Amino acid sequence: MTGALGPALVALAAGQVIVLTGDRLRGGDIDFAVAARHANAEAINFMATHGRGLICLALTPSHALRLGISLINPGAERQSGRPHGRSIEARTGVSTGISAADRARTVAVAIDPASTGEDLVSPGHVFPLIAAPGGVAERQAALEAAIELCLRAGTGDAAVICAIMREDGEMARAEDIAGLIEQLGLVVADIGALLG
């Protein structure tokens, strides 16, 4: 795996959380991303602790359709531009649903090829985002980029992402978490590198 994205693809394949920059739709907000198949309780807890934003399951349109998840607001009226599906929870194997372990269980059920909509209930504590049909070429955002990176890394067609906030509650930029990136050896991937 060569090029600017090589380290990110290696990290995702190894189950590591990476940092995504260059979201063109959110004014420079940054996100954590991990392949959904590696989104265990530890990864979810890391995102909740260091990201502080909403933890979302990034799905392709076909994957969401298989699970019976559609956009909450598919029309043009009163549209925020955030492609959220209804929140979900695993039907079995969870308690309150919000713990890191419970959310990891919900993600695992949602990405299991054998799962259908019958294996999920709503509302829940995992928030699906449904990617644009054209992927990152159509929409240059963390959602589509995370899926594309996971596909290129050979780790499936779903990711878990979390917007990163500073301790004061403002949205973080890469320089705000430079210390964390260095301390933990986190890989940073810019969405623009996917567009070349």
Image (cartoon, rainbow, N blue to C red):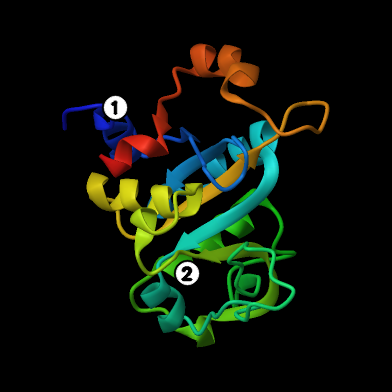
Please give the residue where the numbered disc 2 appears in the rendered image.
109
Name which of mark 2 and mark 1 comes first in the sequence. Answer: 1
- Quarter-of-image position of residue 53: top right
Q: Residue at 62% across / 63% down in the picture?
A: 81
Residue 143 at what x, y percent from top left?
48, 53
Instruction: Give how far apart the Cα atoms at labels 2 and 1 are.
Output: 28 Å
Left or right of 105? Residue 36 is left
> Which mark is nearer the camera, 2 or 1?
1
Q: Return the residue nearer the eye: 159 or 188.
A: 188
- Quarter-of-image position of residue 66: bottom left
Neighbourhood count class around disc 1 (C-alpha, 10 Å): few under 14, some 14–19, many 20 upward: some
**Quadrant assignment for the N terminus:** top left
Mark 1 residue element = helix
Q: Residue at 62% across / 26% down in the picture?
A: 173
Please give the residue where the numbered disc 1 appears in the rendered image.
7
Residue 188 at what x, y percent from top left?
43, 27
Q: Residue furthest right?
A: 168
Q: Residue at 62% across / 62% down in the picture?
A: 82
Left or right of 127? Residue 147 is left
Q: Residue at 60% across / 17% down in the picture?
A: 175
Inspect the image, locate mark 1, and give the three-letter code of the amino acid beneath it: Pro
**Quadrant assignment for the C terminus:** top left
Mark 2 residue element = helix
Residue 29 at what x, y percent from top left?
61, 37
